[in-house]
Image (cartoon, helix red, strand yellow):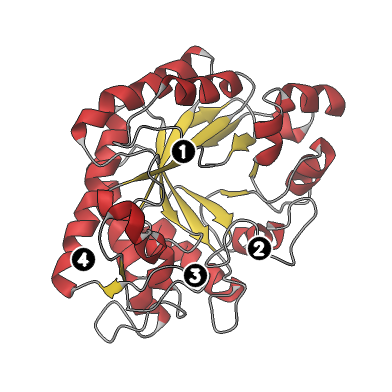
Amino acid sequence: MALLFTEFRVKGLRLKNRVAMPPMANNLATEAGEVTPPLVEHYATRAESLGLIIVEHAYVVREGRIHPNQLGVHDDRLVAGLRRITEAVHAAGGRGALQITHGGAAAPAAVIGQVPVAPSPVPHPLGGDQPRELRRDEIPGLVEAFARAARRVQEAGFDAVEVHGAHGYLLNQFFSPLTNRRTDEYGGNRERRLGFPLAVVRAVRQAVGPEYPVFYRLGADDRLPGGLTVDDAVWAAPLLAEAGVDLLDLSGGICGSRPEGLNGQGYFSYLSAAVKQVSPVPVLVTGGITEPRAAEDLLRQGKTDLVGVGRALLKDPDWAVKAKAALA
């Protein structure tokens, strides 16, 4: 049997295969962040054949939105709608996680109705509004917002929660020297810059308890001069695991998920291959994977434990069914 279609466990979570659909924003929620029928249908139609679905990023506070129709997890009243997604995924025999996030400097002022916040008053390197620096006394409230969001994810019946620390959003902004110029305990060397992400992970772990799976999407390489590199990811991985992370989902940092100059099957696998050497927890990698044989090779070469298939699943919900047949 192809390794891609063997069972895998993350903590107590059993996955029927190693194909994961990574979080990809559909912006099908209401302007209040509520789940809609098209959003439920989108995940239900893909759940049956996949080991894991990671539902798109949901904002933990309204000031962290990226898009007017982004999914929200910032309010208790949203739990019932989110439960509709988990019920549909489970009914199809799938397993689902929900990614929680704050856009930081990437949150447009026109969307959130105010000046965006960031570790430092540094515009996002890829463009956007001039943010204001988060005050020291605001940071504990944001940590708690992530923790409350994680509890809602758990209450809604998801099988895991993923903290978004990649793609140039707030947690990535704190870790990256490109966007963090702070002089307090949350800025300076990489130990201090990782302080806020670690505080979020610890709070999330405490909120959901010791047995609930917690994932972290790590922006493992900014791919910009002066930014985070693979060496930083290799250094951070064991610390994130120690703080409570059960799986590391490797992707781009400030550069985003589809940076210029990278292409081909598994273009982020250089990140997972490096991190897997030091990580005490499993890793997942995405990045242009469309061919079943390429996904299988990544596993057999020991570069990852789970394979994220994104755009190909958007185009063809039956990708995994066809891949299993092709690899038989």
Kind of residue at disc 2? Pro
Residue pictured at 75% horizontal, 34% vertical = 3
Question: Rounded to the nearest whole Å, what is the CA distance between mark 4 and mark 2?
Answer: 30 Å
Q: Which residue is mark 4?
A: 139
Q: Residues within 10 Å of mark 4 (few under 14, many from 20)?
A: some
Q: Quadrant of the C terminus?
A: top right
Residue ID for mark 2: 259
Choose top left, top right, bottom left or bottom right for residue 321.
top right
Q: Give the mark nearest the N terminus, 3 or 1.
A: 1
SS at mark 2 in the image? loop
Work out whether mark 4 precedes mark 3 in sequence or the reverse, and give the earlier one. Answer: 3
Q: Specify the farthest residue to the front.
A: 110
Q: CA distance from mark 4 to mark 3?
A: 24 Å
Residue placed most toward the observer, 16 or 20: 20
Query: Which residue is tagged 3?
Result: 127
Which residue does the numbered mark 1 point to in the structure image? 27
Give the percent coordinates (x, y) of residue 201.
33, 55
Q: Viewed as shown, does residue 88 lie left or right of 307? A: left
From the image, state whether disc 2 or disc 1 is nearer to you.
Answer: 1
Mark 4 vs mark 1: in front: 1
- Is any atom of residue 37 visible in this view? yes
The answer to which of marks 2 and 1 sits earlier in the sequence is 1
Image quarter (top left, top right, bottom left or bottom right) of the N terminus: top right
Secondary structure of the residue carrying tag 4 is helix
Q: Earlier in the sequence, mark 4 or mark 1?
A: 1
